[in-house]
């Protein structure tokens, strides 16, 4: 029983793991051998020579500095990998995940919805944008060597590129209440052609289109449409731009910013606008907010009017 | 040295009074140590029962022995009791209380009444925790993560939090007492660099206790505020930040790990020097390592939160600091090993515990490097790898050292000798039982089994069965000392003042010591562990 290596990270993480394991084994065997030799040779009653040894500064410094240098080496290697683990490539495909006690709900941009399952293609970087409806959960796929806590009212990200078709376990790794150990699912990795067929078969109304409908129904368009008479920030090409705020700072308009601007509009007010936007906190579930965010990301782009 | 010989040996502290009242109103640090010993032994076995329930449930993959709710309450109770009512007070409040004044040649601690008050706080905290159990328990895990603990759990969170809050003050007062005692009450000639390493470890741990524990008290109060009055601090639905709680919690709870392991390191330094009849190798470096661990221990809390939503750069900083704190631990292991060199080694039970400690602590410490490495921690955190890692430190390390210390100083505390054969047997059984219980959990963790799982996938069963089998052996090994040590109280041979022929001021007074420790204030002329000149 060995853990499959099913993502592009897995071999790299395992390489570091194996190296550190070998190093530690070496240290353990070395120290144990020395201890056993001493314990046998200097056990009471033997005639071993016992002129008192003195502490030696050189010895102390050696076994202080050598571990230090080794540790720094492992640290550097680990950081190198860590930065890659935390930096999704630009072309990563976003998929949205909402966790709640005790299930995983997945929304694909094309409107496909799944519960406790996630379908992804081989070879395509995937970026999960995740949030929780209640307590903290953690999205954990051992075969990919990835894990990320999923927080209420906040987006966290996790990215990976699956490398092997197959079905892999998905666990909730952060204790979240009674049925925590049942909050499991599976990640189904498919060949690109199979994945395209799967998307086709499960297509619904696109997430952005759902968001567009919500945008009108909730009355957002009343202020934010270009024709509107209200002095409200324009949302065209907002996603990915830098927004100056009324307190003089700047913020990158990523998914988290869009989410917070809907639910907590007073948190970061765009420069030059009065803080008059009402909060939608408590009126919208996280899944609806995700649809709105998906729509806002298309505003002003060619994909704005899908279907 | 002394000019006045007393006609008859003084009465021992145990003979000062026999009624319950004489114990419950005592100001004698030795009696208070015994009171603590009784309390923590009770909680150790209670927490052990919860562990037994957990391991029994996990023999099969299905959740078939108890309900998920009961299982969650069992591991929460196990954690709360073992951390706050056993591990943290274990060595400091019993061995520390008993030995600190004796080792520095003092008649008592600086504030004897405060010392007794600490014990009462411990008892009151314990009553709240037991009350919480009787009312139906708490299911948040010992970490009380928000917003689950504040807004979602339907169990008795407040009761548990109050218990922990109170017992926290018990350790703050103990810490205060130790610091003042070491600063002001050392015997003539007992300079800082002549202090036994056990005293140094108590001093360092006392500093950590008084600096870190108040943060725990504040954090728990904030949980109470949010749960009772809905003040939004941690729950985002109320405008709070759940990750803030984790920062607060680990700002205390990571130093708390050092509250558990530093005293163990102190005990083991005493046991190994005596077992090998050698001066400690590199005394100064050992002292610096203790202080280094205590200080850097405050700066590594974020390594619990690499996947919690903390910034990538913060994680890098916490990672490097966690690697750095491993250096002094490595120094200590090397120095203990070097102390054996050219020794005159005997393998009495305390020495077996000490050698077992060094081995298990090393495995626990080295696996800590895997968790300090951010890229590996992503896969390992919140799995059984972490469970195995911290049990190697806290059970393999702290409990082995505690029991080794109890055996070593048992003749001093009780005036009786225990059965050496049984004691050696228990120590060896414990070592094997421990490894069989927890080594498989490293493998489970690497294979991806998350912790706190009531049900698990069938593929994990083999390792779980092995672990539960080991836990059974471990359980037996823990009951053995309870039996033969209790036996020795009545039937054990009487110990002389110094049955081990050991150095150290505590062995220069009678066993058990008189109420005020020394007939005459001792004068110190040399450093500790002067086994051979």
Image (cartoon, coloured by chain):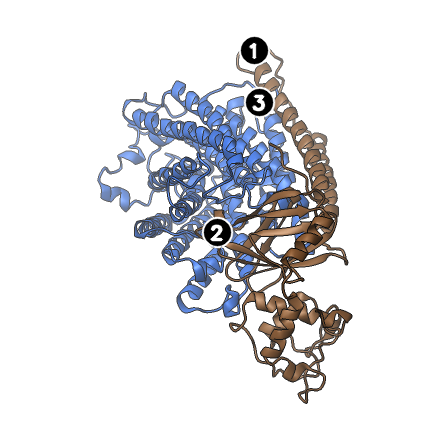
Instruction: Say yes or no: labels 1 and 3 on the same chain.
Output: no
Q: Is residue A154 above or below residue B488?
A: below
Q: CA distance from mark 1 to mark 3?
A: 19 Å
Give x and y (percent) for residue B134. 30, 49
Residue B166 visible (yes or no): yes
Q: Residue furthest top?
A: A47
Chain identifier of the residue bearing label 3 in the image: B
Q: Residue at x 69, y 29 (%)?
A: A56
Q: Is residue B514 above or below residue B493?
A: below
Q: Is residue A105 left or right of residue A246?
A: left
Tag 1 residue? A46
Q: Nearer the viewer, residue A224 or B50?
A: A224
- Does dot 2 land on a helix, a strand or a loop? loop
Tag 2 residue? B143
- Does dot 3 land on a helix, a strand or a loop? loop
Q: Give the drawing colour for chain A.
A: brown
State the mark number for residue B244: none
Instruction: Say yes or no: labels 2 and 3 on the same chain.
Output: yes
**Which one is earlier in the sequence, the residue at label 2 or at label 3?**
2
Spot the blue chain and give its letter. B
Q: Residue at x 76, y 55 (%)?
A: A89
Q: CA distance from mark 2 to mark 3?
A: 50 Å
- Does dot 1 land on a helix, a strand or a loop? loop
């Amino acid at each position: 029983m060995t853990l499959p290596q099913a993502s592009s990270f897995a071999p790299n993480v395992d390489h570091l793991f194996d190296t550190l394991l070998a190093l530690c084994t070496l240290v353990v065997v070395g120290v144990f051998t020395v201890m056993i030799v001493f314990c046998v040779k200097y056990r009471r009653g033997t005639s071993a020579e016992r002129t008192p040894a003195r502490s030696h500064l050189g010895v102390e410094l050696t076994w202080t500095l050598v571990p230090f240098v080794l540790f720094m080496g492992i640290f550097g290697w680990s950081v190198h990998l860590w930065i890659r683990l935390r930096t999704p490539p630009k072309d990563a495909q976003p998929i949205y995940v909402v966790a709640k006690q005790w299930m995983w709900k997945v929304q694909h941009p094309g409107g496909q919805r799944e519960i406790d399952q996630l379908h992804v293609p081989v070879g395509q970087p995937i970026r999960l944008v995740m949030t929780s409806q209640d307590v903290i959960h953690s999205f954990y796929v051992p075969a990919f060597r990835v894990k990320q806590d999923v927080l209420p009212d906040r987006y966290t990200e996790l990215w990976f590129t699956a490398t092997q078709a197959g079905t892999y376990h998905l666990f909730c790794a952060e204790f979240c209440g009674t049925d925590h150990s049942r909050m499991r699912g599976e990640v189904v990795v498919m060949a690109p052609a199979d994945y395209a067929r799967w998307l086709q078969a499960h297509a619904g109304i696109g997430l952005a289109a759902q968001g567009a409908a919500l945008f009108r129904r909730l009355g957002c368009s009343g202020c934010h449409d270009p024709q509107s008479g209200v002095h409200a920030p324009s949302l065209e090409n907002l996603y990915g731009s830098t927004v100056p705020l009324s307190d003089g700072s700047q913020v990158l308009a990523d998914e988290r910013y869009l989410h917070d601007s809907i639910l907590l509009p007073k948190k970061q007010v765009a420069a030059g606008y009065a803080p008059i936007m009402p909060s939608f906190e408590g009126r919208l579930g996280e899944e609806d907010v995700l649809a709105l965010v998906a729509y806002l990301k298309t505003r002003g782009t060619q994909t704005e009017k899908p279907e | 040295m002394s000019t006045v010989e007393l006609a008859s040996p003084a009465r021992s502290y145990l003979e000062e009074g026999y009624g319950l009242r004489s114990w419950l109103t005592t100001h004698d640090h030795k009696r208070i140590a015994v009171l603590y010993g009784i309390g923590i032994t009770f909680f150790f076995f209670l927490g052990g029962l919860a562990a037994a329930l957990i391991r029994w449930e996990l023999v099969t993959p299905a959740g078939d022995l108890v309900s998920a709710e009961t299982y969650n309450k069992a591991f929460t109770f196990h954690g709360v009791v073992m951390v706050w009512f056993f591990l943290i007070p274990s060595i400091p409040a019993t061995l520390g209380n008993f030995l600190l004044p004796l080792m520095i040649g003092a008649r008592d601690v600086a504030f004897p009444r405060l010392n007794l008050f600490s014990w009462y706080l411990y008892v009151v905290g314990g009553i709240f925790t037991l009350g919480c159990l009787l009312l139906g328990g708490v299911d948040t895990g010992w970490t009380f993560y928000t917003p689950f603990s504040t807004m979602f759990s339907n169990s008795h969170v407040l009761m548990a939090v109050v218990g922990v809050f109170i017992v926290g003050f018990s350790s703050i007062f103990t810490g205060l007492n130790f610091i003042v005692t070491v600063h002001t009450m050392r015997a003539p000639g007992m300079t800082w660099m002549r202090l036994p390493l056990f005293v140094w470890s108590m001093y360092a741990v006392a500093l950590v206790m008084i600096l870190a524990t108040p943060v725990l008290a504040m954090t728990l109060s904030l949980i109470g505020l949010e749960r009772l009055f809905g003040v939004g601090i941690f729950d985002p639905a109320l405008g709070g930040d759940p990750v803030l709680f984790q920062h607060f919690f680990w700002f205390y709870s990571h130093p708390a790990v050092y509250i558990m392991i530093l005293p163990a390191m102190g005990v083991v330094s005493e046991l190994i020097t005596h077992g090998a009849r050698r001066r400690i190798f590199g005394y100064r470096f050992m002292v610096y390592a203790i202080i280094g661990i205590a200080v850097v221990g405050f700066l590594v809390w974020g390594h619990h939160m690499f996947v919690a939503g903390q910034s990538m750069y913060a994680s890098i900083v916490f990672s490097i600091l966690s690697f750095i704190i491993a250096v002094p631990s490595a120094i200590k292991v090397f120095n203990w090993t070097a102390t054996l060199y050219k020794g005159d080694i005997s393998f009495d039970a305390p020495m077996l515990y000490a050698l077992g400690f060094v081995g298990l602590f090393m495995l626990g410490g080295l696996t800590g490097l895997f968790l300090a490495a951010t890229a590996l921690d992503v896969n390992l955190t919140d799995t059984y790898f972490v469970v195995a890692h911290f049990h190697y430190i806290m059970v393999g390390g702290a409990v082995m050292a505690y029991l080794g210390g109890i055996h070593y100083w048992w003749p001093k505390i009780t005036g009786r000798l225990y059965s050496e054969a049984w004691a050696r047997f228990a120590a060896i059984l414990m070592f094997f039982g421990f490894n069989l219980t927890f080594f498989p959990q490293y493998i489970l963790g690497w294979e991806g089994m998350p912790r706190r799982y009531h049900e698990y996938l069938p593929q994990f069963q083999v390792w779980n069965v092995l672990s539960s089998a080991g836990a059974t052996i471990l359980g037996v090994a823990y009951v053995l000392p309870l039996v033969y040590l209790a036996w020795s109280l009545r039937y054990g041979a009487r110990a002389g003042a110094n049955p081990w022929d050991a150095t150290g001021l505590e062995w220069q007074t009678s066993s058990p010591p008189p109420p005020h420790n020394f007939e005459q204030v001792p004068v110190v002329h040399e450093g500790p562990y002067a086994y051979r000149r």
